[in-house]
Each structure stands twice: as C-alpha cells, then as structure tokens.
Image: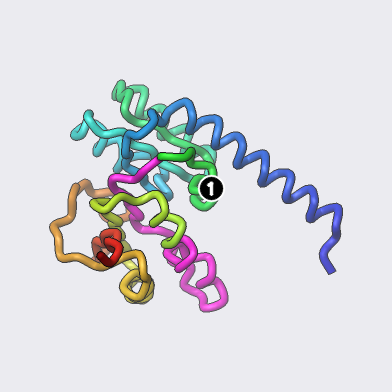
Amino acid sequence: MENPKQAALYRLIISQRKSDIGDILRKILPSGRPFVWEVGCGHGHFLTEFAQVHPEQLCIGVDMESKRIERAYRKRDRARLPNLHFVHGEAKLFLEALPSGAEFSTIFVLFPDPWPKLRHHKHRILQPDFLTAVARKAGERTQLCFRTDFQPYFTEAMAAVRDHQDWRIVEEPWPFEYETVFQGRADSYHSFIARRRLPAP
C-alpha cells in the first residue's frame, strides 16, 4: 500500500519542479514565437550546432540529467548563442509547464533510451499521451523528427505516430544533419518525420 505521506511529498516535489520550469520558460520564451525543442538533449552537441546554423530560430533543449545540462550551457556560452537555452527537467513536466501561446516549430527526438526490455516499454517517450500533449503545442507546420539505432523501437514509434489522430508520417528530407556521439557509434539508424494533422474542414 502506498504511504500517504510519501505520496504527498512526491506530489509536492513534482509541483515545485513544474513551477521552477515554468519560471524559467517565462523568462526565455517570447510570447508568440515558435521554438525548436530537443527532447533529451544530452550535452547539447546537436542543438548547439543547430542554433549556430540557424541564429534566427529560438532553441530549447531539455534533459533529466543536471550534469548534462551544465555541460550544454558551457557549450552555449563558449559559442555565444543568445538563441539557445537548456532546461533541466523531464519532458512531460516541460510540456505541462509551457506557458499559454507557446508553440513548437520543430521537435527533435534523437536516439532516446530504447528501454529494450518488455517490462520497460512503458518508459519509452513516444507514447500516445505524449504525442497528444505535444500536438496541443504544435502548429500546422510543426515537424516531429525521430531517429533511433534500435529497430524495434523505430517500428513501435512509427506505428504509434501513424495511428495517432493528431499526427501523420510525411516523406520529407531530414531538416538538419549533424553527427551526434550516438549516431557516430551506430552501425545504422532509422528516421522518420511527422507533421500535425490538420482538422477536417
């Protein structure tokens, strides 16, 4: 049986984390400006390169590991990129903390943890509830770009997106190529791009 005191403490911690992320986002997100989001940005290699090549685009990377975010910020500062920010937190809390009017232009999910054991599949990021939450902050031209080196996860993720009412798989060129550490180590990898479905007329 769940301990009520522990459950209450957990809810309090989560609420505080969400509040902290919301405070950060209100400072770095201009009202009405779409932004690029990298889910699980790691040390920030990919997004730093992207932000350098696209100075006109606002970029935000999110990762659960604080040490990774610290290293990502050091990269950002060395490169002097005012359009690039990193946030320590979980992707789902980040979505919940986004202010009203915030909108994605592109979402990158690159080499996420595949959670290969069957009992851990529930932890994979591309789940129906996550796709629904992302769709609420997606414009009609928003791209969702997914890449993995784990074929079973690719198959599952593509099916989840294809079957989701808010998304459709599209045949489009990958928007930005930069070889990450994971990509460099992979013997092969698999990618797809999805866009927000438009409401029926």
- In percent of width and height, residue 16 lies at 67, 39
User: Along the horizontal axis of the image, is 120 left or right of 157?
Assistant: right
Closer-to-camera residue (112/89): 89
Rendered residue at 41%/34% (across/down): 72
Q: Residue at x 55, y 37 (%)?
A: 21
Give residue 166's position: percent from left, percent from top: 35, 65
| Classed neighbour count for the residue bearing mark 1: other residues with Cα under 10 Å, few (<14), some (14–19), many (≥20) | some
Q: Is residue 53 left or right of residue 4?
A: left
Specify the quadrant of the image occupied by residue 85.
top left
Residue in view at x 49 percent, y 64 percent: 129
Indicate whether 51 appears above or below 143. above
Q: Nearer the viewer, residue 180 or 152?
A: 152
Based on the picture, tell me whether residue 124 belongs to the magenta stretch.
yes
Residue nearest the viewer, comparing 133 with 93: 133
- Residue 147 falls left or right of residue 102: left
Q: Which residues are magenta?
A: 102-130
Quadrant of the image for the N terminus? bottom right
- The answer to whether residue 4 is left or right of residue 19 is right
Q: Position of residue 37 (x, y in %)?
A: 36, 44
Picture residue at 36% right of the left edge, 46% below the top = 38
In the image, residue 108 lies in the stretch drawn in magenta = yes
Residue at the far front: name it: 201
Q: How is the image coloured?
A: rainbow
